[in-house]
């Protein structure tokens, strides 16, 4: 089976990336090529290893197809595939090239923490400047910087086992494909753990919330005749915090249930 997959690799890869677009497809193709290289090297190690790989490739490719396009990282952060166990990731930063009111040369432009309102015009007033004042003036400079960071691949590993008898019993009694169910369970567990790792990292970057809701203090500070007034104050606070998230992340306001 391993040999058949390698001989028809282009067809296999097209089938596994069908329906994916943009960066999801690029990442998936890179991961599949890495997996192919691993399976090829393992299969060449000997008959025992080759037998293990023959069983592995029935599971690993469907698991990859289930995991890679569905992880939450694709929606929240930048994802860059690695071509080996050690690689570099890159990110683009736009920075102010000159010091002006509200901006310092070298600071990140469009940062959610410090946006210079008038860098392209009247820096001190935060407004545009009269056209006559900027004629024959090139304007303040912006610079682009590509940052790089060395990263190393880490490992997640799961295992599962079943017998042919159990698979036959499950199929005849419940109509279940044990192999498919186990692959789905493995994929779901890996996906959930990756998602939680990403969310934990993002929560650590977010810091501590600055807004708190104190209903007794609100009721004491205002003369309320309807409990809905206190709930309205909570809604306003939530909306304010959600809009602050949009300002800081530039990816949209926060939502809640």
Image (spheres, rainbow, N blue to C red):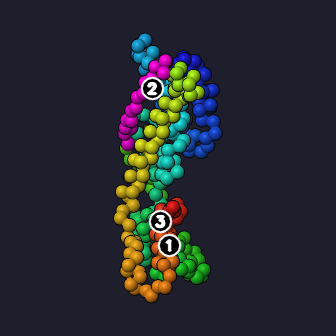
Element type where label 1 sits in the image: helix
Mark 2 to mark 1 CA distance (whole Å): 53 Å
Q: Position of residue 14 (x, y in %)?
A: 62, 31
Q: Is residue 167 above or below residue 214?
A: above
Can you identify the residue that label 1 sits on? 235
> Foreground: 117 or 131?
117
Where is mark 3, residue-wise?
245
Where's the N terminus, which quadrant?
top right
In the rendered image, is residue 33 in sight? no
Check disc 3 and report its element: helix, strand or loop: helix
Question: How far is disc 3 from disc 1 in space, using C-alphas?
Answer: 15 Å
Front position in the image: 131 or 81: 81
Mark sitting earlier along the chain (2/3): 2
Q: Along the polypeptide, which appears first: circle 2 or circle 1?
A: 2
Residue 204 image offset from top left, x and y in percent:
36, 57
Kindly identify the residue that appears in the image at 37 percent across and 44 percent down: 150
Relative to 134, say whether 184 is above or below: above
Name the mark nearer the viewer: 3 or 1.
Answer: 1
Q: Residue furthest bottom?
A: 223
Rendering coords of residue 226 (x, y %): 50, 82
Residue 153 among magenta residues: yes
> Is 38 displayed left or right of 132 in the figure?
left
Pick whichever of labels 3 and 1 is earlier in the sequence. 1
Between 158 and 235, the one lying in front of the other is: 235
* Viewer can see residue 225: yes
Is residue 170 found inside the magenta-colored segment of the image?
no
The range drawn in magenta is 151-166
Q: Which residue is mark 2?
A: 38
Callout 3 crowding tier (Cα within 10 Å): few <14, some 14–19, many ≥20: some
């Amino acid at each position: 089976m391993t040999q058949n997959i390698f001989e028809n690799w282009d067809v296999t890869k097209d089938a596994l990336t069908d329906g994916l677009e943009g960066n999801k497809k690029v990442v998936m193709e890179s991961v599949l090529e890495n997996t192919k290289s691993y399976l090829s090297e393992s299969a060449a190690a000997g008959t025992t290893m080759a037998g293990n790989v023959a069983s592995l490739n029935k599971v690993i490719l469907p698991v990859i197809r289930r995991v890679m396009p569905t992880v939450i990282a694709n929606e929240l952060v930048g994802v860059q595939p690695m071509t080996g166990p050690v690689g570099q990731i890159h990110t683009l930063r736009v920075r102010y090239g000159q010091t002006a009111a509200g901006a310092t040369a070298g600071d990140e432009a469009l940062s959610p923490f410090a946006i210079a309102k008038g860098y392209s015009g009247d820096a001190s007033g935060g407004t545009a400047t009269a056209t006559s004042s900027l004629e024959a003036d090139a304007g303040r400079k912006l610079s682009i910087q590509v940052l790089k960071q060395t990263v190393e691949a880490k490992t997640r590993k799961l295992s599962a086992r079943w017998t042919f008898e159990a698979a036959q019993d499950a199929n005849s009694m419940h109509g279940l494909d044990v192999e498919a169910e186990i692959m789905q369970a493995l994929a779901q567990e890996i996906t959930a753990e990756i998602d939680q790792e990403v969310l934990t990292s993002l929560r650590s970057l977010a810091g501590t919330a600055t807004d708190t809701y104190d209903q007794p203090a609100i009721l004491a500070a205002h003369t309320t005749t309807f409990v809905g007034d206190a709930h309205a104050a909570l809604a306003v606070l939530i909306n304010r915090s959600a809009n602050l998230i949009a300002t800081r992340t530039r990816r949209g306001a926060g939502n809640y249930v």
